[in-house]
Image (cartoon, rainbow, N blue to C red):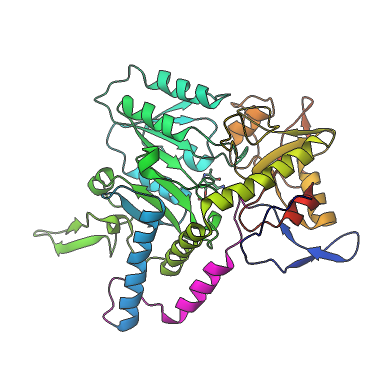
Amino acid sequence: VHSCGAPLPVLGRDVTVPLVTGGEVAYAALDYAASAPALQRVWDDVAAYAPYYGSVHRGAGYLSQLSTDLFESSRATVHEFLDCREDDQVVFTRSTTDSLNLLAGVLPDGCEVFVFETEHHAALLPWTNARVTCLDAPRTPGQAVLTLESALAGRDLGVPALVCVTGASNVTGELWPVRELAAVSHAHGARIVLDAAQLAPHHPVSVRDSGVDWVAFSGHKLYAPFGSGVLAGRADWLREAEPYLAGGGASRKVSRRAGGGVDVEWHTTAARHEAGSPNVIGVYAIASACRALTEAGFDTLVEREQQLVEKVLAGLAGVPGVRVLSLFGDGSSSTPAGGTPARVGVVSFVVEGWSSSHFAAALSAEYGIGVRDGLFCAHPLVRTLLGGDPRQPGECGAAPGGDSAEGAGRPLNAIRVSFGAGTPDEHVERFV
Ligand code: PMP
């Protein structure tokens, strides 16, 4: 077996789980796309800081000052990690979902939003205050660019517009042509936000190089714990809109209005959208993860992960009845001609004659492997990939035994295996 080099140490490496067949086995967490295990290094950093944490931005005490420094230097670390433009703001949120909802709340009046039907629901649904154009699933990266271009062509340039795209699909793992989509958006006077929830843990993200206006990601997928996320990018819409939450921290001056009511002047910095006491530990953990990934080096991480992707795809290709889901190709290779990796460590598939939820339950009960089954909060995409109609409603992640494995002769759910920097070779070998 070709060795893929050493995984980064993560929490949960020593957890063993019982098997229905008897005995126990080391748990193989192959559900990184849902939440990646935190890096041991992040845990250690947080543990070292935890005794000293205090309320940020307000306290005069030493520990409050220390926490404020760490909170603000974490912002600078994320700014650097994302290779942001100098004037870009980094707003700390709870998650990618939170970040995209925040952005939805700062859209200028009359803003149009363009989004592919292939998006995760976090990117598909928050735009309730805008006129949304939902674009058909493209079947190649080039088609994605052309589809967007024809949707934007001829639009009224006086109307503000936002395009929302994924960097890497949480279903197929496939990479989207972000730089090209950003160029097309800008050529037609639109702005673009990158959902980097699945991209940032696996690839370097450069706001400058890609040209995107905003980027969103979640700490818990980037080897930090739950509860913190990021929205980074252009300051103007953020600065001009009402705060995401109204309250202390977001306000600069508050006074009683003559004749009744309250007057408020909001901050124009990221603090405008961070009202209330922030998740200082979660933010510190994100910064620690950014540092750890940068130090490990994305070249090394990508190379190792691509070897794991190849192992999984080659293994699945040898199993009769397995179909790997792919929007942009036949799913047989992670590396198209030219050598650019085509997918991150996320592979979804169906197995002929099997209910996906039974299959996933068997991987857990018989092999100690944790994967996910269902529609992965991307209903239209999964339905398209399974040969169905993206306009038909469906259920997300039906319970084992409760899903109908086949609808009109085709599966309704899929199985997803996902992995990353902490995955040992043995986990994917056992899976295969
Ligand atoms: N976008 C993508 C592509 C995702 O995979 C996810 C999480 N599955 C999200 C957004 C939402 O992330 P969170 O649940 O952390 O808000």
Side (left or right) of 223 relative to 366: left
Side (left or right) of 106 relative to 411: left
Residue 128: % across, % down? 41, 37
Q: Residue at x 26, y 80 (%)?
A: 60
Query: Where 344 sits versus 201, above or below?
Result: above
Residue 240: % across, % down? 23, 46
Q: Nearer the viewer, residue 129 or 363?
A: 363
Q: Is residue 370 among what the camera can see? A: yes
Query: Where 402 sits versus 411, above or below?
Result: below
Q: Residue at x 38, y 64 (%)?
A: 74
Q: Nearer the viewer, residue 335 or 430?
A: 335
Q: Residue at x 29, y 27 (%)?
A: 189
Residue 159: % across, % down? 27, 27
Residue 424 placement: quadrant:
bottom right
Residue 184 placement: quadrant:
top left
Side (left or right) of 279 relative to 86: right
- Residue 173 inside the magenta-drawn segment: no
Q: Is residue 401 among what the camera can see? A: no
> Residues in magenta?
32-60
- Residue 57 inside the magenta-drawn segment: yes
Residue 311: % across, % down? 73, 44
Side (left or right) of 308 relative to 154: right
Q: Nearer the viewer, residue 230 or 331?
A: 331
Query: Where 318 sits versus 358, above or below?
Result: above
Q: Residue furthest left?
A: 258
